[in-house]
């Protein structure tokens, strides 16, 4: 095993619904990608932050055995953890402080480097893993998760690690994840309900003659009207067709937004991340529609699209390598 393969960076991310740890070599080979979903009570639409914090503490204790095994077999040279949701001022959620402080304690105990990042940057880096995108210095990124639906313009200088991230589109009210989960819970599925809705939509053979009415202007979407339309027919239609209607509306909303934004910024490559982006129905149908407009979408594997800590580990590797290079030159 080479020195680069033996030296690893640990990534930690404690989001609203998942405790995640990852390990990646300096050659960017994934050694570990572990996650534990937080428990959400049946018929519930989510968790309080205090409940999330409590579960993260317990989950990190459970995952510590995995970390011990890594320490026994590899040389941990750094730890990188998400500190907050986004790389902007006043971005804060209590759940992220658990992973951040756990990471600091771990790094100090191992006498190794500690780096911080954000949940959004973690998602972006994980979505770029093994991506065939042609221009990594300027592209659009769509973050579709339980609490977020944003279309981001990412740009950076050639030799820079950090992106300038600008919100250029998204939803103005609820997110796609909230819409899907709310409808899913009403249909009788456990939260989070995305995987059930996706399977239903894929299994539904009935054609949609008149889809739900969408509200899109200048790249921004309003989704509360979709929920109201579904609520009016939810008791008179079967689960598969309701699911297909919901995801079809997601596709058409995103299609309209991306057509507008892609032309506005003259960009034809879009990277997707977040749990909702793991939907096979959305991937297939949205990619097909936009390919006709010469707009190309890039989706990573579901395990890297949903909440994970691989992006944190990748960011840690990049920062570690830059520091090592500077130290060699000085």
Image (cartoon, rainbow, N blue to C red):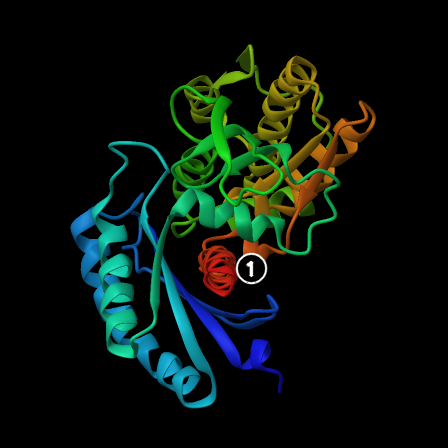
Residues packed near mark 1 inside 10 Å, few (<14), some (14 to 19) or many (20 plus): some
Q: Observer-nearest residue: 80 or 4?
A: 4
**Is residue 285 rendered to the left or right of residue 88?**
right
- How many marks are shown on the rendered structure? 1
Residue receiving disc 1:
303
- Return the x and y of residue 179 as percentages of the image width and height: 44, 32
Please, is residue 33 above or below residue 282 in the view?
A: below
Which residue sits furthest front? Answer: 330
Please, is residue 264 above or below residue 162 in the view?
A: above
- Return the x and y of residue 174 as percentages of the image width and height: 39, 27
Q: Quadrant of residue 26?
A: bottom right
Please, is residue 289 above or below residue 137 in the view?
A: above
Whether residue 204 is visible: no
| Residue plotted at (69% across, 42% down) | 298
Name the quadrant of the N terminus. Answer: bottom right
| Residue plotted at (54% across, 82% down) | 6
| Residue plotted at (59% across, 66% down) | 28
- Return the x and y of residue 78 as percentages of the image width and height: 39, 68
- Return the x and y of residue 266 as percentages of the image width and height: 70, 19
Which residue sits furthest bottom? Answer: 72
Q: Observer-nearest residue: 277 or 181?
A: 277
What is the secondary structure assignment of the residue under circle 1?
helix
Whether residue 281 is visible: yes
């Amino acid at each position: 095993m080479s020195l680069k393969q033996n030296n690893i960076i640990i990534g930690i991310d404690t989001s609203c619904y998942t405790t995640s740890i990852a390990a990646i070599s300096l050659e960017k080979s994934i050694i570990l990608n572990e996650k534990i979903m937080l428990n959400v009570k049946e018929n519930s639409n989510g968790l309080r932050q205090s409940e999330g914090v409590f579960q993260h503490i317990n989950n990190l204790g459970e995952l510590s055995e995995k970390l011990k095994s890594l320490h026994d077999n590899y040389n941990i040279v750094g730890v990188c953890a998400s500190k907050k949701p986004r790389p902007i001022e006043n971005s804060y959620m209590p759940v992220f402080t658990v992973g951040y402080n756990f990471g600091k304690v771990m790094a100090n105990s191992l006498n190794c480097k500690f780096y911080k990042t954000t949940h959004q940057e973690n998602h972006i880096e994980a979505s770029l893993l093994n991506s065939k995108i042609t221009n990594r210095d300027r592209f659009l990124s769509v973050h579709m998760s339980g609490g977020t639906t944003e279309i981001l313009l990412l740009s950076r200088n050639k030799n820079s690690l950090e992106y300038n991230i600008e919100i250029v589109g998204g939803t103005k009210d609820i997110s796609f994840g909230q819409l899907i989960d709310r409808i899913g819970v009403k249909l009788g599925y456990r939260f989070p309900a995305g995987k059930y809705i996706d399977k239903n939509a894929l299994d539904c053979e009935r054609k949609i003659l008149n889809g739900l009415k969408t509200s899109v202007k200048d790249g921004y979407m309003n989704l509360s009207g979709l929920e109201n339309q579904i609520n009016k027919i939810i008791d008179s239609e079967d689960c598969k067709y309701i699911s297909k209607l919901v995801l079809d509306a997601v596709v058409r909303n995103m299609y309209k937004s991306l057509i507008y934004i892609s032309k506005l910024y003259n960009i034809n490559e879009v990277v997707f991340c977040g749990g909702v982006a793991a939907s096979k129905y959305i991937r297939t149908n949205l990619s097909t529609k936009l390919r006709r407009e010469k707009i190309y979408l890039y989706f990573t594997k579901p395990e890297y699209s949903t909440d994970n800590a691989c992006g944190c580990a990748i960011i840690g590797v990049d920062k570690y390598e830059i520091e090592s290079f500077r130290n060699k030159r000085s």
